[in-house]
Image (tube, grey):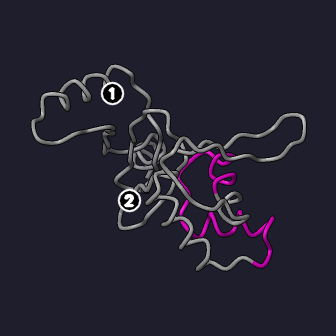
Amino acid sequence: MAKLSLEASTGEMALETTGKADMKYTNQRVEIIAFLREHKGHPTVDEVYDGVRKKLTRISKATVYKNLKFLSERGLLEEVNVKGVTRFEANFVPHHHLICRECGRIEDFESEELFDYSMKIADDIEGFSIDSVNTNFYGKCKKCKEDNKNG
């Protein structure tokens, strides 16, 4: 796994690898990871492209897409698919997702108890080595519930 850090004294971004991702850290990859780290949430390819393009004005959407896929395959980003739309995140703190069935909003939900319980169950599964787990909860977000009451 790689870790992106911001050097306080110089303001420079640095990627520290822990062995999982043996790769070149191009300007594009560093800026994509930095954007995802700085902007909490689960942006789409278009949203990442719009954000990264502010710093790398000549970057193409195809380059952003290829790098997002590449970084996901290397374990540096997570993909979250909701309603047929792929979203990306760089939050590696164990967490789960609350997903609104109406608007597609995704919220992170941290629960050590749920994570520990899930991993305990995973330990009992034979023939498969599980190293992480996340759970998606589907329902209606607060805003959609309020909109339905008022509408």
Q: Residue at x 48, y 48 (%)?
A: 20
* Three-letter residue code for mark 2: Asn
Q: Residue at x 31, y 25 (%)?
A: 114
* Three-letter residue code for mark 1: Phe
- Provide the residue span drawn in magenta: 33-58
**Helix, strand or loop for disc 1:** helix
Q: Residue at x 52, y 51 (%)?
A: 76
Q: Which residue, as the protein is rendered here, is positioned at the far top? A: 113
Instruction: Pinpoint residue 146: horizontal percent, then vertical percent.
Output: 45, 43
Which of the pair 111/56 is nearer the observer? Answer: 56
Q: Is residue 85 above or below residue 61?
A: above
Residue that numbered label 1 is attached to: 115
Instruction: Pinpoint residue 39: horizontal percent, then vertical percent.
Output: 66, 48
Badge 1 crowding class, 10 Å Cα cut-off, few under 14, some 14 to 19, many 20 or more, is some
What is the CA distance from the residue labelled 1 to the residue labelled 2? 20 Å
Quadrant in the picture for residue 94: top left
Q: Which residue, as the protein is rendered here, is positioned at the far right? A: 10
Residue that numbered label 2 is attached to: 81
Q: Residue at x 42, y 34 (%)?
A: 95
Instruction: Pinpoint residue 117: horizontal percent, then vertical percent.
Output: 25, 23
Side (left or right) of 40 relative to 56: left
Badge 2 crowding class, 10 Å Cα cut-off, few under 14, some 14 to 19, many 20 or more, is few
Side (left or right) of 28 relative to 40: right
